[in-house]
Image (cartoon, rainbow, N blue to C red):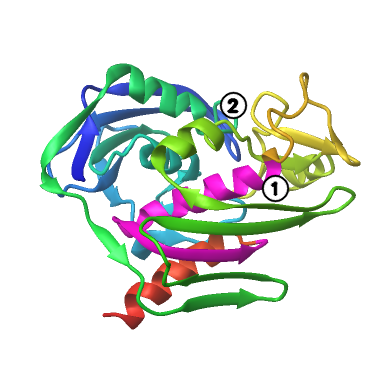
Amino acid sequence: MFQRTVRSPVRFQGPGLHTAGHHEICIKPARVDFGVVFRKFAKDGSFEDIHASWKNTKDLPLCTCISNDQVSHVRTIEHLMAALYACEIDNALIEVQGSEVPILDGSALPFVEAILQVGVEEQSAPRRVHVIEKTFEVTEANRFIKIEPGEDEGLYVDLTISLAKIGMLRWAGTLSPQLFRDEMAGARTFGRLRNGFLAKLTRFKKDPICLGANTRSALVIVGDKVINRGGLRMPDEYVRHRVLDLMGDLMLAGCRFQGRITAESTAHRLNHQLLRKIFSEQA
């Protein structure tokens, strides 16, 4: 498989999940081996480039955030990164006006549809694939994620979550960009209504949480049901969204993986730690 980039620029705008406000991004074509780089513009027109890499992650709640200096950052990039996986994009320059990627409907689907509409261009260099040859694991209380050698080509994922009043949900299978587009991309982020109080409490903090969360941008759970019009898009939408988040985080490796992942209630922080462990131990 060869590397790919977008054929022409793709633009998005809207509120952020955590900061609300108004944010704009433009995905632009990039050369071979460029990777994915976020170019964050300041109000005076200056900018800084932040490479979408596990080395640049900043620990903020309920999202994947990247930063060069732990001060200026771009937040909630995981759904967009998952869309790049789904569309097989390896190289892209993403211009950002604001501090967060627009949340849109809370899934990767709007990004996927817009990218496929403008088209994808195959490039002249082979895509990087990292073959897992030994086991790496990260554990935190009742959460864990493990990657180990796989029996077949590709990436096999077995992911389980447990939600209060809903129970245990599991998705397992070998992922491919096509399957991801068809079965994962539309799964939306989710949270309980009580988390709205958390948003109010953090409104005046430097890094607020969930200020832009509503039924247009997320699945809102009350008890054991969602209150969104139309309900769930798929019976196990919650766990499929966690798979979506995982694939978005794995894109921070700058390659595709061949192996087997087993995870229970994994979170962005654990996904980032797994990448750090893989590449630091093999350095």
Which residue corresponds to mark 2? 105
Of residues 185 and 178, which is closer to you in this image? Answer: 178
Of residues 59 and 264, which is closer to you in this image? Answer: 264
Q: Position of residue 140 (x, y in %)?
A: 65, 75
Of residues 183 and 62, which is closer to you in this image? Answer: 183
Q: Position of residue 127 (x, y in %)?
A: 21, 50
Q: Residue at x 45, y 79 (%)?
A: 135
Horizontal side of 22 relative to 43 (left or right) equals right
Few, some or many residues within 10 Å of mark 1 (<14, 14–19, 20+): some
Q: Which residues are magenta?
A: 238-265
Which numbered disc flags the more N-terminal residue, 2 or 1?
Answer: 2
User: Residue lying farthest front?
Assistant: 151
Relative to residue 128, is residue 9 depicted above or below?
above
Horizontal side of 123 relative to 68 (left or right) equals left
User: Residue lying farthest left?
Assistant: 124
- Which mark is drawn over residue 32? none
Quadrant into which the N terminus falls: top left
Q: Position of residue 166 (x, y in %)?
A: 85, 47
**Residue 51 seen in render:** yes
Relative to residue 116, is residue 207 depicted above or below?
below
Quadrant into which the C terminus falls: bottom left
Q: Amino acid at mark 2?
A: Asp
Of residues 198 and 216, which is closer to you in this image? Answer: 216
Q: CA distance from mark 2 to mark 1?
A: 22 Å
Horizontal side of 6 relative to 106 (left or right) equals left
Q: Amino acid at mark 1?
A: Thr
Which residue corresponds to mark 1? 202
Q: Residue at x 33, y 51 (%)?
A: 52
